[in-house]
Amino acid sequence: MHLRFTDQELATLVEMVSLAANVASWNRKPGAEGGIGDFERIENKILEKARQAGMAGAIEFDEQRQLLQVTEEFQQESFFQECYDELRNESFWEELVIRLADRDLMRRIGREAWEALDEEQRRERTEDIEKRYWEEFTARGIDRVAVIFPRGDG
């Protein structure tokens, strides 16, 4: 297969595959290594072609991984870094809100009743709780989040 890209399209493709490989690397589940390796090999192939096509200044060899990667300078100036940062930020807040709301519901109705609910039922039952957490975190971030250790635990 042969594809032709403009310089701008090639730079966008480099960002896309680098973003995908970066996100895939988060997967720490047993057996994920094969999928991550597939992503890295495709990324390496695209980066090699991009390097040959005039993007050598944006691509470097990572000695530890023995693969090509975009330079930190390229990454910091790229749209993919903005997307990656936004993904991480949104994932953090959404997961925090959902987990805290689920914890609160479980405390209210008991673990057995909570486990009997499917995901849709849990989201319905926690809608007001989630809204309260979203309002809190939007206004104050994590400033008022605290862990209360049981007596004697530190």
Image (cartoon, rainbow, N blue to C red):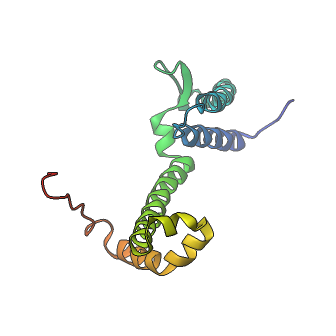
In the orientation shown, which residue stands out farthest toward the front?
112
Image quadrant occupied by the N terminus: top right
Residue found at x 24% / y 60%: 147
Residue found at x 21% / y 62%: 148
Q: Using residue 9 as the reference point, say whether residue 36 is left or right of it.
A: left
Check the image and report above or below for 11 versus 87. Answer: above
The one nearer the camera, 21 or 93, is 93
Q: Using residue 85 as the reference point, say whether residue 13 is left or right of it.
A: right
**Quadrant of the image occupied by residue 47:** top right
Check the image and report above or below for 78 versus 117. Answer: above
Q: Where residue 26 sits in the image (x, y, percent)?
A: 51, 40
In the orientation shown, which residue stands out farthest toward the bottom?
128
Q: Where residue 101 sits in the image (x, y, percent)?
A: 43, 70
Residue found at x 61% / y 29%: 40
Check the image and report above or below for 8 versus 65. Answer: below
How many numbered callouts? 0
Q: Where residue 122 sits in the image (x, y, percent)?
A: 55, 71
**Quadrant of the image occupied by residue 134:** bottom left
Q: Using residue 93 as the reference point, say whether residue 122 is left or right of it.
A: right
The one nearer the camera, 2 or 52, is 2
